[in-house]
Structures are given as structure tokens and as C-alpha cells.
Amino acid sequence: MTRALEAEGLVLSWDGGETIVARDISLCVDAGETVCLVGRSGCGKTTILHALSGLERPVSGTVRVAGEDVTGVPGHVSYMLQKDLLLPHLRIVDNACLPLRLSGVPKQEARDRARELMGRFGLEGTEELWPSQLSGGMRQRAAFLRTYLMGNDVVLLDEPFSALDALTRTDLRDWYVQMAAQLGLASVVITHDVDEAVEMASRVYVLGGKPSEVVEEVVVGDGARDHILELLA
């Protein structure tokens, strides 16, 4: 079966190869599946996402999307950063449809396409509001919609819930997993929160060592949380 996203043997650096920060990074994710990367701060998790997205070329190794080699080539996955990065001078509908506008879709068509999805993303009634008028959770929903409208079936998320309060974080991550499954999105999520990882993911890639590497791929089930904590100790 062709994987939605697959990385094999990635070796990554911060400075063109002089300082290796991660090595032998191999992972995969299928359509409708969410996997998580967990590891201590500074272990290179974001660098791994940069390589998966094509924003950085690995020293060696291969990234494939739907079986196609896309190593070092951006534009094949959607990437959402930790902060929502909504533009304060644009209304919510215009923030959401920004990827469509940047790809050349006429303004009214782009707005209409975003409006059609507002209800599904829990944003109905916010179309003409400004970002400053929304709660943190609603802003993240708008950012998710904008990410979805990038048009890719693979989504990379760099700690997307860490800035939210505990209740909002729980509600939003549960909503995201359900939505991603419904839409058939393959998601790779960075998190420092082991509880969040086992709640969201079917599998968790635990990173450790210097240079960082995959210590173990943990299939989520009974005892997974405690096992991951032991690996991170």
C-alpha cells in the first residue's frame, strides 16, 4: 500500500551538514491517520518537519508523498505552525481563503469556497469578524481551515494546541482528530505532551539521543503512556 507520507533514513543538520542534529529518521503515515513526534526540547522535531515539508533538504535520505519522491521540494504538504498567524487586517473568511488567493483563485470564488466550510470547521457566524474578536480556540480553528485550503492531503502540525488553555486544548485536539479522519488527512503532529500524543495518535515516534534518532515507534494502546515516559526519562 502506498503511504500518504513516508520518510526514510533522513539525516538532518542546521548548517549544511557541519552539525548533524538528527539521523536515520524514518516514519510513515497513512490517509486519515494521525501520528505524533515526541522528544525533549532541542532534539530537532521542528527540523524534521521542515525536511518533511521540503523547506529544508536533508543531508541524506528520502521523503515521499503518495509514493512520489519530493525530497527538498516544497508545496506537497500543508504546514501549520504553533501560532495561528492570522493577519489582523483581514476578516476571518479572508484569512481562511488566503491560500486560494495566493494560488490565483479570484477573490469572490475563494471567499465562497471558504464560507462553504465555515460550519464544518465550527466557524459559522465568524466570517466577517476580525481575528481580535475570536477566542484562542476559534482562531486555531480558522488557522486549521486555512491550512486545509492549502489543498494537500498531508498536514504537518507543530505544537498547534500548546498556547491554549487545558479545556480548549482537549476539545480542539479531539475535534481535529475526528475532522482529519473524516477528510482523509494524514497528520504528523509535534507535541511535548505525552498525554496529548496518546490521545491523538495511533502511533508515536519517540525521539532521543544526540544526534536525535527514533528511539522507538510506539503503537498506542494499554500501557503506551507509561512506556513513552520511560523512553523519555
Image: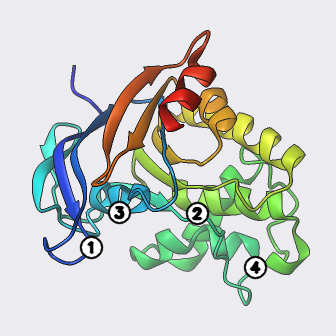
What amino acid is labelled 3 in the image? Thr
| Total count of labels | 4
From what the image shows, is residue 181 above or below residue 158? above
Compare residues 18 and 46 and report the one nearer the observer: 18
Q: Secondary structure at mark 1?
A: loop
Label 4 Cα crowd, 10 Å radius (few <14 / some 14-19 / many 20+): some
From what the image shows, is residue 89 above or below residue 85? below
What amino acid is labelled 2 in the image? Arg
In the drawing, does residue 128 fall left or right of residue 204?
A: right
Query: Where does label 2 land, which residue?
Result: 146
Q: Where residue 125 appears, x then y in whole percent?
A: 88, 60
Label 3 – label 4 distance at C-alpha: 32 Å
What amino acid is labelled 4 in the image? Arg
Asked if the residue at tag 4 contacts the one at tag 3, i.e. Cβ–Cβ closer than 8 Å, the answer is no
4 or 1: tag closer to the N-terminus: 1
**Mark 3 or 1: the one toward you:** 1
From what the image shows, is residue 116 above or below residue 89? above
